Image (tube, rainbow, N blue to C red):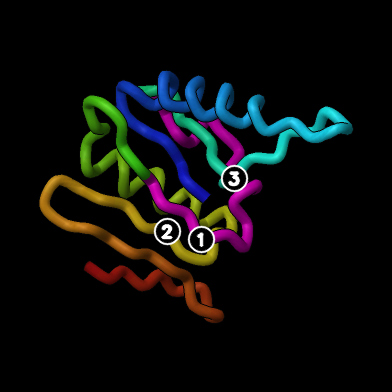
């Protein structure tokens, strides 16, 4: 699943939404090629429910001006705490991969 962030996240979400509308089947159900969600720029990610990411691998992708590294890591932690299997996030100087083991400990790789 892709989680769109940054100042251009909502524009990218709108483009993806319209692309998905182009893939309607005969029962008028949207058939997206990928799962995605968007976080509005400069919003507190703790105001949102991230449970939909449970069990999924999540890539946090920035469009436009990025959030701060601290904000991106905070978001990654919230998504992981909600049950995501892995979270990948690109920071200014590195890529972080986070996962939680069976004991609840968070592992970070970069």
Q: Is residue 82 left or right of residue 8?
A: right
Q: Is residue 82 magenta?
A: no
Q: Mark 2 and mark 1: span between their CA atoms?
A: 6 Å
Q: Position of residue 65 (x, y in %)?
A: 22, 26
Mark 3 / mark 2, whichever is N-terminal: 3
Contact between labelled residues 1 and 2, with CB atoms less than 8 Å apart:
yes
Marks 3 and 2 close (CB-CB < 8 Å): no
Q: Position of residue 7 (x, y in %)?
A: 31, 22
Q: Depth check: give the residue in front, 33 or 88.
A: 33
The residue identified by callout 3 is: 33
Identity of the residue drawn at 74% across and 31% down: 24
**Residue lying furthest left in this view?**
93
Tell me if mark 2 has few (under 14), some (14-19) or many (20+) residues whose alpha carbon lies within 10 angstroms of its own: many
Which part of the image, by quadrant, shows the C terminus? bottom left
Front: mark 3 or 2: 3
Q: Residue beneath label 1, please?
A: 57
Q: Tell me the residue at 35%/42% (across/down).
A: 61
Task: Look at 31% across and 69% down and name the residue there.
Answer: 108
Q: Viewer-proximal residue, 89 or 46?
A: 89
State the mark number for residue 87.
2
In magenta, the rendered stretch is: 43-60
Residue, far right:
27
């Amino acid at each position: 699943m892709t989680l769109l962030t940054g100042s251009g996240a909502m524009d990218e979400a709108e483009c993806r939404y319209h692309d998905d509308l182009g893939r309607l089947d005969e029962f008028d159900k949207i058939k997206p090629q990928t799962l995605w969600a968007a976080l509005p720029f400069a919003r507190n990610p703790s105001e949102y429910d991230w449970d939909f990411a449970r069990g999924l691998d999540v890539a946090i992708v920035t469009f436009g001006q990025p959030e701060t590294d601290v904000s991106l890591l905070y978001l990654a932690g919230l998504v992981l705490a909600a049950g995501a299997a892995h979270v990948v996030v690109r920071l200014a100087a590195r890529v972080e991969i986070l996962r939680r083991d069976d004991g609840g400990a968070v592992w970070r790789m970069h």
